[in-house]
Amino acid sequence: MSRGEQLIRYIGVTLITFFFACAVSLAGSPPKKTIKTVARTARPVGVRPVVPRLHFCGEMVPTEHSTVSQKLAVALMSTGYGRHIDALKRRTAPYFAVIEPILQRHGIPNDFKFLPLIESDFKANAVSTAGAVGYWQFMDETARDMGLKITSENDERKDLVKSTEAACRYIKFLYRKLGSWTLVAAAYNGGIGMLQNQMVRQRKQDYYTLALNEETGYYLYRILAVKELFTNSGQYARMALGPMAYTDNPYEREREQARRMGWVQDDEPMPVGESITTEEGFTSSDNDPAVIDSLLAGILKKKASIKTVFAGDAEARLTKAGKAKLGQIWLFEMTQDVQLRETTVKAGDIIHAVVDDIDSRGQIFLRTLKVVSAATHESIPLTFLLINPATGQAGAPLPKALKSGWLTSWRLL
């Protein structure tokens, strides 16, 4: 097949996928009678089936949007892991055994354990086209900023424990800046400067609606695809998953992107190390459109039977609203006792929050200046961000009729 024919075929697959997703989205849920029949045959009478919703670190993935579900379907096909997921689970188990306790100790969601699989395929001496090295693919400067030593004799980026500790420090730094685990993952790939610039330019705070470069725009979907294969492998066992066809050399394509982003120069030597490419190569089956359609149907079925609400670390009610302007102070009262790390926050404690931003969509961004104990009037050393309870991301839409009692969710930094 010629290069032109491959390109036409790829465009055709994309269009088929898009229109199929739209059709399924418009069709909505099956009739209630059908749902009841399935429930009776699959479960005891009276037990309503609950389909788990896709999420990343507790932040819901809006798969009801056709573009999101289409990208996830393509990512599921493109991982190259679908055909040997059981072998991959066995190979990654020792790495996860090391990484998971470190993530837990740092208070980082477990979903981040999939990053080094995406970044380096768990290869210690993996080197990217831009010169990033090791399990977590650190560039020299970032690695040193996070406390890793790099010498000709010893590069700690290749040490699983030390590089994971450094990755945790970097992830927490990104979260303090962004307030969303989804945006943290995007910034880990594309850089926090690039991501923040795009958020300001596009006036958007949501990864799924931001227009980003191809690599970062698909990065989270690759993580979600691997997580989905690991957690629901039986659902995809009979599907002929495999990587999508490319019309060029993927390594050269990555290096060209690195040149465009200013990470490498034409006269720089090729990096020494193991290239990060799919071991099976880049091939495609004759059933790509049918497989994508099947994947989309499964993804779009995962709609919550009831409205899914993201639970933050703390819940508080508005007691005194300032003006909707930068720098204004708002007061909120905790609704329940919460144990956060080594600190207990009790119902009645007061959050003193400052307005950081009001965006064009009417979302307000609040950050705590202090939390004051109602019993002792002492300040409690905790920092919260106001979050949207539907997505878990920083910022929340202001109610049309703002009044005392507005219930809000807060995420601990």
Image (cartoon, rainbow, N blue to C red):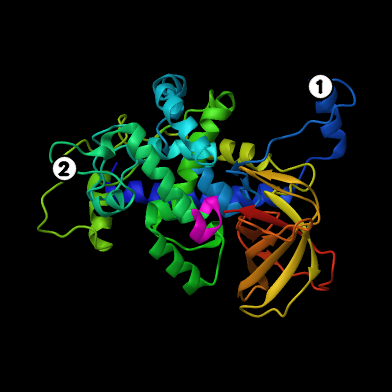
Which quadrant of the figure contains the N terminus? top left
- Residue 139 or 268: which is nearer the viewer? 139
Residue 363, located in which quarter of the rendered image? bottom right
Q: CA distance from mark 2 to mark 1?
A: 60 Å
Q: Is residue 242 above or below residue 258?
A: above
- Residue 348 or 47: which is nearer the viewer? 348
Would you say residue 306 is visible in this rendering? yes
Q: Is 387 left, or right, of 2 in this rendering?
A: right
x and y percentages locating residue 253 in the rendered image = 26, 51
Q: Specify the amino acid type for callout 2.
A: Thr
x and y percentages locating residue 347 in the rendered image = 80, 52
Crowding at dot 2, Cα within 10 Å, few <14 / some 14-19 / many 20+, comes out as few
Q: Specify the amino acid type for callout 1.
A: Arg
Mark whose residue sits in front, 2 or 1: 2
Q: Which residue is mark 1?
A: 43
Query: Would residue 409 be counted in the magenta stretch?
Result: no
Which residue sits furthest right?
Answer: 46
Residue drawn at the location 48% of the way across and 37% of the way down: 103
Q: Tell me the number on the disc at residue 151.
A: 2
Q: Which label's residue is closer to the chain start, 2 or 1?
A: 1
Q: Which residues are magenta?
A: 175-182
Q: Main secondary structure of the magenta part?
A: helix
Residue 387, located in which quarter of the rendered image? bottom right
- Residue 42 or 390: which is nearer the viewer? 390
Residue drawn at the location 79% of the way across and 55% of the way down: 375
SS class, disc 2:
loop
Residue drawn at the location 43% of the way across and 52% of the way down: 11
SS class, disc 1:
loop
